[in-house]
Image: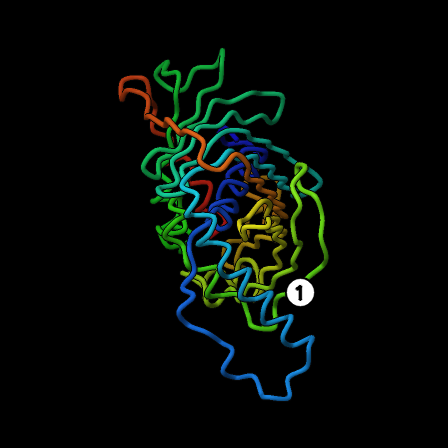
Amino acid sequence: MRVNGTRAGAIAVAAIVGSLVLSGCGGGDESESKGSDASPSASGSDGAREQGTTEVRAAYDKTAEAESARMTLQTKAAAEGQTITTEGKGVIDLDDGNSVMTVTGQDKSIEQRVVDQVLYQKTPGQKAPGGKPWIKIDLKKVAAQQGVSNQQIGDPAQTAAYAKAITDKGVKKVGTEKVDGVDTTHYKVSVDVSKLPGGDRLSRQIGPTLPMQVWLDDEGRLRQQRVDMTVKAPASASAKPGTGASPQQVKVSTVMQFSDFGTEVDAKAPSAGQVADMTDQALQGGNQQS
């Protein structure tokens, strides 16, 4: 996931940006009930669907209430015949989004921290510009360029967007499954992209609906979430063949798992003298897709 000028670097940046859209675990507003539209003759299946919708919407609040968790993250980004897979393991503060993880990908192991919506990465044996061991990317600036609300970046407990954007008829119960040894209920969910922050622009990039799958434990908390999407560049951003510019279409698949709720999280930013700011390079990569 290191930012550079190569095509692989462009795909990796797209994977980061794609993950930003997905990273909210934030609470929904359960005060707005949708049940009043149902007629007295609603079928049992309609009632089950409404119950599933309520449970999925409530899951974001219930997960955030756990305050922290151990998290694993796998992201696959594919474009023009090239696929980059990154896997991360660590802990996350579900209140403010701070996290400490080890991320592996492209035969590298990266130490990664997110502190106050800034991403820090350190690759052992590799120096950033100026001989610094760490790089940083300001996720707020990347989010602003992509038309994504700051609340979707690294602040899971404040993100009500998913819960509000789930359509009433967009939740389907798949069945019961075990996730990491825990009994869960598996749902397929359809998210109305236009109802997400920055939805108009996002719709042009990933389409009108976002298919999502969630696995909830017996306490209604998220144990696993999977999103598969295709990030498209607008026609105005057409890149000339052979220039090494960012690909026009990137397929991104992201799976997050949560466990050990309430675990301790100690996320601290590296000292300023040890960090090279790579935000501008990340923004340049994003400009070729936006």
Task: Give how far across and how far down residue 168 sits, in percent.
Answer: 56, 72
Q: Position of residue 82 (x, y in %)?
A: 68, 37
Kind of residue at disc 1: Lys
Residue at 67% x, 54% y: name it. 186
Q: Which residue is mark 1?
A: 172
Q: How many residues crowd mark 1 within 10 Å: few (<14), some (14–19), many (20+)?
A: some
Residue appearing at x 41%, y 19% in the figure: 128
> Would residue 41 be found to the left or right of residue 219 on screen?
right
For the rendered model, the colour scheme is: rainbow
Residue 224 on image: x %, y %: 60, 45
Which of 66/3 is in front? Answer: 66
Q: Position of residue 83 (x, y in %)?
A: 67, 37
Q: Secondary structure at mark 1?
A: strand
Furthest residue toward top: 125
Q: Say which of 63 and 190 sits in front.
A: 63
What is the quadrant of residue 199 in the picture?
A: bottom left
